[in-house]
Image: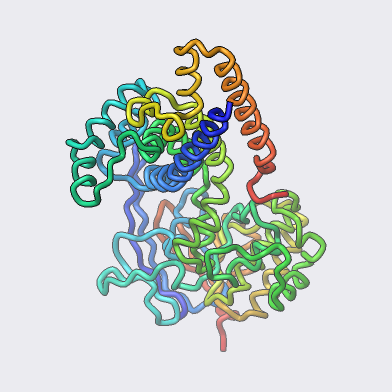
Amino acid sequence: MENAWIALSLTLKVAGWATALNLVFGVAIGFVLARKRFPGRDLLDALLTLPLVMPPTVLGYYLLVVLGRHGPIGGWLQENFGINLIFSWQGAVIAATIVAFPLVFKSARAAFEAVDPQFEQAARVLRISEIAVFFRVTLPLAWRGILAGVLLAFARATGEFGATLMVAGSIPGKTQTLSIAVYEAVQAGQDDVANFLVLVTSVTCITVLLAAGRLAPGRIAGQP
Amino acid sequence: MIWDVDVRKHFENSKRSFKLDVRFRSNARRLVLFGPSGAGKSQTLKIIAGLSAPDYGHVRLEGLALFDHLARIDMRPQQRALAYVFQDYALFPHLTVLQNIAFALHPGLMNPRRNVRHDSVTRWLETFHLEPVAHQYPEQLSGGQHQRAALARAVVAEPRALLLDEPFAALDRALRAHLRQELVELQSQLNIPLILITHDQEDVDCFADAVIHIQDGRTIEETVDHDALAP
């Protein structure tokens, strides 16, 4: 049973990092795609949405090829820094980040597109710098839509299985997250362990959903 | 010369093609751009404010070039220091009236706090009778309070000039007359140039030292109230 808590804390660590990374990259890229026009924008949007529709195992395979010891990025990291991402919890973070990325990026793009540019213009004539316009007007007005995507991404990252298994494997205490531990327990015929793990997973998910309900701001972000 | 505007801009989308060609020079402290909807008045005002860039021409305010195609000058809206009141006011919906008015006084990355107090903000709240709603959000305001809050937010930053896009269009008749009078008083108190755009003859009668008529994107005539400009 102790393994279940280790798996839970590892799952939360991986999902937390994946969500934090997606918050930064998903929001930034969502903003660029919502506001800038450039050739290849639609293609880029399609490529970035791909993880939503591709089987996670296929994504995991791509990641193995790219991040593996002989892959372009993995080889470079190994050669220059001695870092190996495969079979590490950081590898699991990368897998979960990529799988959950479209959820943040898509909702961020839609939320930014829904912000009336007139509010940004109003801020500009009030002599606020461009970066301040983003943080004081655009982001608060888009925040609600972004938050919805972020919470979904956290839930998705918590339940990630296929890509994580391919990239990080199933090393108990190191890369074995809850969803993988459940699979292993069932495979090994340890029904009591499986039951307990499923219970912990369910309680975790309900807690996240309840927290999300409490966190969700009023009709407009920033309002009490 | 207070205003020296000579701008051309070509707009093109799938629905229509529109040529803006607006030229006027005026010494009027209170200038009205008059014309029907869709004539290009708002676009002209946006170009003056720096929210939209013309293809050619120049915009000068009291000799200062805000935009000059030939000299490659295009001041950002932040540098132009002009106050702009949008037709539907564009008050920030996530900020209280107080935070909206104090907005320009906080140049950093953070919005003013909800309990922020500045002397100038307090003064404008009093001038525009907004004290009772200072902590309310824009959606809770009446039409007149909306307009006053937008004006207060615009003038608190001590702008070089005041640009108003159909400031009374969203209000009922009785309120309009009252707020026109308030605006006349505000302008003479601040003593900064004002441009107001409208399609309402009553605005012209009430405000205009001079009127620029705009139709189909072109300035067609200029009428000047010579008494108002007499030294």
Quadrant of the rendering where the C terminus of chain B is positioned: bottom right
> Percent x, y for residue B56?
29, 63
Q: Position of residue B55 (x, y in %)?
A: 30, 59
Residue B127 in sight in this render: yes
- Asked whether, in this view, residue A136 is left or right of residue A160, the answer is right
Q: Is residue A158 left or right of residue B60?
A: right
Residue drawn at 55 percent across, 79 percent down: B226
Quadrant including the N terminus of chain B: bottom left
Image: A124 above or below B138: below
Q: Residue lying furthest bottom in this view?
A: B231
- Residue, far right: B132
Q: Nearer the viewer, residue B23 or A202?
A: A202
Q: Is residue A50 above or below residue B63?
A: above
Q: Is residue B205 visible?
A: no
Q: Could you say which is closer to the camera, residue B79 or residue B103?
A: B103
Image quadrant assignment for residue B111: bottom right
Q: Position of residue B113 (x, y in %)?
A: 67, 64
Q: How many marks?
A: 0
Determine which quarter of the picture holds residue B30: bottom right
Q: Residue at x 54, y 37 (%)?
A: A9
Give the colour scheme shown.
Answer: rainbow
B151 relative position to B21: left or right: right
B209 vs A175, nearest the viewer: A175
The residue drawn where x is 24% and y is 48% is A82
